[in-house]
Structures are given as structure tokens and as C-alpha cells.
Amino acid sequence: MRIKLLVATFDSDYAGHLSGTISMRHSDAIEVSVCSSLERLHELLAAQRYDVALLDAEMAGNADLRYIHLPLLLWAEEESAGAPPVAEDFKKVNKYQRVSSIVAEVLERYAKVSSNTRGSDSKRARVTAVWSPAGGVGKTTVALAFATRMAADDKQAMYLSLEHFSSIRTYFTETGKSISSVFEMLETQEGNLQVLIRSIACKDSGLTYFSSPENFDDMNILTPEHLDLLVEACTGLTDELVIDMPCLCDERARRIFELADDVFLVADASPTTQIKLSQFTSQNNVFESIRAKTTVIENKGASVDIPLVEPVVSLPLVQHASESVVYKTLSAGNIWGDEK
């Protein structure tokens, strides 16, 4: 869904810059209209309703708020002297900040007052779950490499880490608002989940990702039912959703396996990994339910024998001090086959 945003300010240069940048960079999330006169403001509000409006003080004082779901005040402290008084319940948005920050704030505020928690977009991304029964096999590196490869192939790709202890900061230098706000909305079931996800999403080389939870316990909020809603919302916003899973094989993991179109089973050459893989494939009925959609990822130059599982993708050992260099190197090679 795209929200309808009205920018109403007498500063026509500012309005043009803001609306132009939003139209160029955020048109997938926002449909923007602009007015720089009271006459035009009245015309627009008479013609349609708006989800959000960014109004300067004089515009806000003359707007018919019945046609605006969420009116926000464009505010600059240095311009406040002599400005008309406005209602105290107006939420303020700092006028002079990066456009991306304004967009994120608008989306986040609207998500909290909007209904429709469930995803509403028609598209449904392909879901790839990346898992291993053993830690330290390079599961996150594999997940990011694959997601980055999909982004490089001109697909909208989203990386979602559900690990309890996130390593996001190892791979990305830029972080935004914590994904904990998404978990809180899942728990309360109040607000618009897709809009909130858009508001906190970060970008790197075409790949969408999310900042870490605020603390360990936030991840424990999630139930299998929450995962249904989360995956539904995410798949309405992208073409490829890559889920980096914890090593547990609990009720939540089984639900992700059910939701996934593909499962990447990651292994290295360590004896511990081989033993755990053998136990999972021979003693756990979950494996039989996902065998047909499982691809074995032999990471770090490993060779793994799992009977009756094809295809197998073999990734070379890439040694570098930077984890981001490692996954980007793996994403660039012609080693992923034609799974997608």
C-alpha cells in the first residue's frame, strides 16, 4: 500500500525539494501532493482525503482536519517566532532534517494510528529459510550472500534475522530503529505492520535489512502466530525474503520451515556439524517434511553427504578480516545455480 501524503507550506522551494525527493526515492511507499497557498490547500482537501499531512503553522491553522487522518506540524525552532499558535495536540516533525528521516518518521507515526495490522499488498515474495543445527557454520554469511545476489539480479530482496543474538552490526555500518518496535506491534496487534516495517527498514546495496532487537528477550515475544503475521507483512513488500534462523528446531523454527518456499541447510566440515546434521536428518521427522525443498549449502569449502538431497551448492572458503567483504564476495560468484 502507498499512503497519501500532503505537504502544505508557504515555502515553495522547500515543498518542491521535499516532494521531489520523496517521489524519486520513496514512491513505492508514498504518493505525495503539494500546495503552497491556502486556496490550493482548500481545493485539495475538498477533492480527497489524505492519510498524512505535513503542514506549516499557518496552513495547519486553516486546514479542515476532518479530511486528514494524521496531521503533522512541520516545525523549525528558528522559524517559530511570530508563527501562528497551533493546537497543542499537533505532533511536530523537524522541518530541517534528511528527507529519509522525515519519511521514516511519517511512516512510523502513521503505522501507529492506522488500522489493518495484516499485510494488504498483493505481491507475495519467495521465502528462503537459512538454517543449521550447528552454530559457527557461516549461516548468516550465507543468508546475506544469497540475499545480496538476489538484489544484484534486480529483485527486491529483504534479509530478516530472527537470531536471538544478532550480528547485524558486524555486517552493516548503518543502523536505524530497532526491529523491537515490530515485535511490540505483533504483540499488541494494533497498527499497520507493513507501514511500520517500511519506516524502520535500512538499505545497503539494494538489500533491505533491519537493526537488531533492543535486548535478548524481545525475540522471545514471537509466537508461531506472530511469525505468520510478520512473514505475511514482509512478503507483501519485497520479491525475495531471506530469513536467517537460530539453530534451534523448536515450534517457531518448524513454523518458518512451513512458511518457506526453500530451505538452505548450511554445513561446514567440522565434526560437530557432521554429527548434528546426521542426528537431524536421521532422527527428526521435521527433515522429512522439508527434504523436497531443501538445498544443502556446503560452506567454507566443505563436503557434506546428505542422502537424497539435491541440489547442493558449494561455497569456497573466503578469508578476510571484514565479514561484509566475505558475504559480498560469495554473492558475486556464479555459484548459486538456478534455484530461483
Image: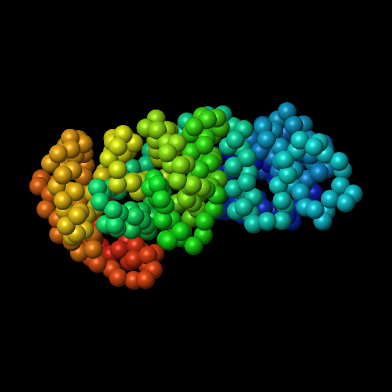
Q: Can residue 230 be seen from the camera position used here?
A: no
Position of residue 189 measured from the top left corner of the image (x, y, whole percent): 51, 29
Instruction: Please give the count of numbered marks on the rendered protein.
Output: 0
Q: Nearer the viewer, residue 333 or 155?
A: 333
148 up-or-down from 319: above or below: above
Please report the residue visible at 37 percent of the width from the left and 42 percent of the height from the top: 125
113 up-or-down from 333: above or below: above
Please report the residue visible at 39 percent of the width from the left and 64 percent of the height from the top: 324
Position of residue 165 measured from the top left corner of the image (x, y, whole percent): 41, 50
Q: Nearer the viewer, residue 193 or 151?
A: 193
Please report the residue visible at 52 percent of the width from the left and 30 percent of the height from the top: 188
Position of residue 139 measured from the top left corner of the image (x, y, whole percent): 30, 54
Task: Farthest residue to the bottom: give it.
Answer: 320
Please report the residue visible at 32 percent of the width from the left and 61 percent of the height from the top: 331
Task: Farthest residue to the right: give it.
Answer: 82
Compared across the picture, whether 167 is left or right of 103 comes to: left
Which of the 4 quarters of the picture holds residue 37? Answer: top right
Colour theme:
rainbow
Q: Can residue 175 be seen from the camera position used here?
A: yes
Compared across the picture, whether 15 is left or right of 252 comes to: right
Which of the 4 quarters of the picture holds residue 6? Answer: top right
Q: Nearer the viewer, residue 239 or 247?
A: 247
Task: Farthest residue to the left: give it.
Answer: 307
